[in-house]
């Protein structure tokens, strides 16, 4: 990973490694320990990377802008601002990443707790439960439990490993569950008597995010639309509308828009909203949701059949015709693997999991197989309980789509209005040069400037507006993002053409 390499490289550079010797950031240290299953970094390495990145950005931006002819009064503040931004991004990334896992961990906490109960009820050991979680395909927990298995192999008691693991978790539910598990082992009590096994934090977090959704959505949309307006005013007042250096702003605005959109999507995506195949072109969110809803019906039917005495091999063909097409295709893969290819149950469910669109569906296919291999009768009751909770939580999570749908028109209007305003501001660029008010006159006169002369500013704004329309439409799950982007671009050019005509700007 690029970030990991940067941190490990930066800590070896003497000037920056000396600065970070006395680093005492408890939250950063906790985040570094939490991310150990994913990346190997240190708190000193993160701080060193932040200072190194800020230094390189300052030097690189300053040199580039000076080569393009900008004055020091503009170059130094701009380079310093970007350096501070990159310093904050680098140093806050581990904590941000840890907090990003919080909701996901809370959502998986009750499922992991059910796995521990299942193992203990079938006379399994804590080592068996840890091994089951490690094999279940959870995005973070399985990797973390694989490290726990490695520590146990070195002679560390499992109870100590679980308590050490719980200390660094951002999820209160995870800490509560594992503290209860270790406590029940010491007191020989029943886990079912200790707590319900329901993750309250996940439900509360989803409701809290739904309440924040409207304001956060509009803030993101406002930032990506107002910043180009401020930039156009600054460039026009400074008299840089004709400079090629203005073109560098387009990729910066596009990257900024992408970062905000992705951060918004990660923070407010429903828990069933993650694609299993994390490639450049993942499946559509609506297809993942349809598959997930169909899978919940599968879990309900499976729980009923297995509780009544059927095995998983018998239950799958029995409920196959009652399932929706999205899950029916996955069940067919498992049935064919069991009865035609003579694969084991876990192998068949693994093959079905590999064809799922959603990450949650893929994980649950594997977990159902593990639960049924451990105890078929107890697995039926567990599957029914988990399905009931997931159906309830699914309704809360889907409130997100309703809120976004209600705000979609506002985001469209904000984007389109910004495109029109940018078009009018671009036509005013030759007339806003502040030098004409502070000196004997402008370096160029409005009558001598043409549309072709301010082509760098127009190209920058045109590219930015197209990207803004496309990404804002994607952010609110709108249809035809390319068409919306084209509409925004046309509005920009129409506003510019009408305004420039009134101002008397010529084409050449």
Image (cartoon, rainbow, N blue to C red):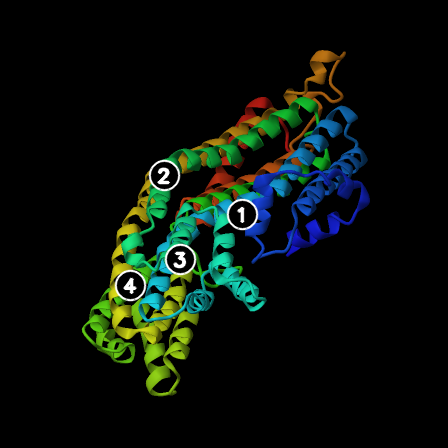
Kindly state the secondary structure of the residue where label 1 is placed: helix
Which residue is tagged 3? 186
Image coordinates of residue 354 in percent, x first then y, are: 44, 71
Earlier-in-chain disc, 2 versus 3: 3
Earlier-in-chain disc, 2 versus 4: 2
Image coordinates of residue 140 in percent, x first then y, are: 49, 58
Mark 4 vs mark 1: give the one in front: 1
Q: CA distance from mark 3 to mark 4?
A: 41 Å
Q: CA distance from mark 2 to mark 4?
A: 26 Å
Left or right of 395 on screen, residue 366 = right
Kindly state the secondary structure of the residue where label 2 is placed: helix
Which of the labelled discs sits on residue 208, or is there none?
Answer: 2
How crowded pointer 1 is (Cα within 10 Å; few <14, some 14-19, many 20+) is rated as some
| Residue 494 visible within the image | no
Q: CA distance from mark 2 to mark 3?
A: 36 Å
Q: Are marks 1 and 2 in contact (CB under 8 Å)?
A: no
Earlier-in-chain disc, 1 versus 3: 1
Left or right of 261 on screen, residue 355 = left
Q: Of 295 and 224, which appears nearest the observer?
A: 295
């Amino acid at each position: 990973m690029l970030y990991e390499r940067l941190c490990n490289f930066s800590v070896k550079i003497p000037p920056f490694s000396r600065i970070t010797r006395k680093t005492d950031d408890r939250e950063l240290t906790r985040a570094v320990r939490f991310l150990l299953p994913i990346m190997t970094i240190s708190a000193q390495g993160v701080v060193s990377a932040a200072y190194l990145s800020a230094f390189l950005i300052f030097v690189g931006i300053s040199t580039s802008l000076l080569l393009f002819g900008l004055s020091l009064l503009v170059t130094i503040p701009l380079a310093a601002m970007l350096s501070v931004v990159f310093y904050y991004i680098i140093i806050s990334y581990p904590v941000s990443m840890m907090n990003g896992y919080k909701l996901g961990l809370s959502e998986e906490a009750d499922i992991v707790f059910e796995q521990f109960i299942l193992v203990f009820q079938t006379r399994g050991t804590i080592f068996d439960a840890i091994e089951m979680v490690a094999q279940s395909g959870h995005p973070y927990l399985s990797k973390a439990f694989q490290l726990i298995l490695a520590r146990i192999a070195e002679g560390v008691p499992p109870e100590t490993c679980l308590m050490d693991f719980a200390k660094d978790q951002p999820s209160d539910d995870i800490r509560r569950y594992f503290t209860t598990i270790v406590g029940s082992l010491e007191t020989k009590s029943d886990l079912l008597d200790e707590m319900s096994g329901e993750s309250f934090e996940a439900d509360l977090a989803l409701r809290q995010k739904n309440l924040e959704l409207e304001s956060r959505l509009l803030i993101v949309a406002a930032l990506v639309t107002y910043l180009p307006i401020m930039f156009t005013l600054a460039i026009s007042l400074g008299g840089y509308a004709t400079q090629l250096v203005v073109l560098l702003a387009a990729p910066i605005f596009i990257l900024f828009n992408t970062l905000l959109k992705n951060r918004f999507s990660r923070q407010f995506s429903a828990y069933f909203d993650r694609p299993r195949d994390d490639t450049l072109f993942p499946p559509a969110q609506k297809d993942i949701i349809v598959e997930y809803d169909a899978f919940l019906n599968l879990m309900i039917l499976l729980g009923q059949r297995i509780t009544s005495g059927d095995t998983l091999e018998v239950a799958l063909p029995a409920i196959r015709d009652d399932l929706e097409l999205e899950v029916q295709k996955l069940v067919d893969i498992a049935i064919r693997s069991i009865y035609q290819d003579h694969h084991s149950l876990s192998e068949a469910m693994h093959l079905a999991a590999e064809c799922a669109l959603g990450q949650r569906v893929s994980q649950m296919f594997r977990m159902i197989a593990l639960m049924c291999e451990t105890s078929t009768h107890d697995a039926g009751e567990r599957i029914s309980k988990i399905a009931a909770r997931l159906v309830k939580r699914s309704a809360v999570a889907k409130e997100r789509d309703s809120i976004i749908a209600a705000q979609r028109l506002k985001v469209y209007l904000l984007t389109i209005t910004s495109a029109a305003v940018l078009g009018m501001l671009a036509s005013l660029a030759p007339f806003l040069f502040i030098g004409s008010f502070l000196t004997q006159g402008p370096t160029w006169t409005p009558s001598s400037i043409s549309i072709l002369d301010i082509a760098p500013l127009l190209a920058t704004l045109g590219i930015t507006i197209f990207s803004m329309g496309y990404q804002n439409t994607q952010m609110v799950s709108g249809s035809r993002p390319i068409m919306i982007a084209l509409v925004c671009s046309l509005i920009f050019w129409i506003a510019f053409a009408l305004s420039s005509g009134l101002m008397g700007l010529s084409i050449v």
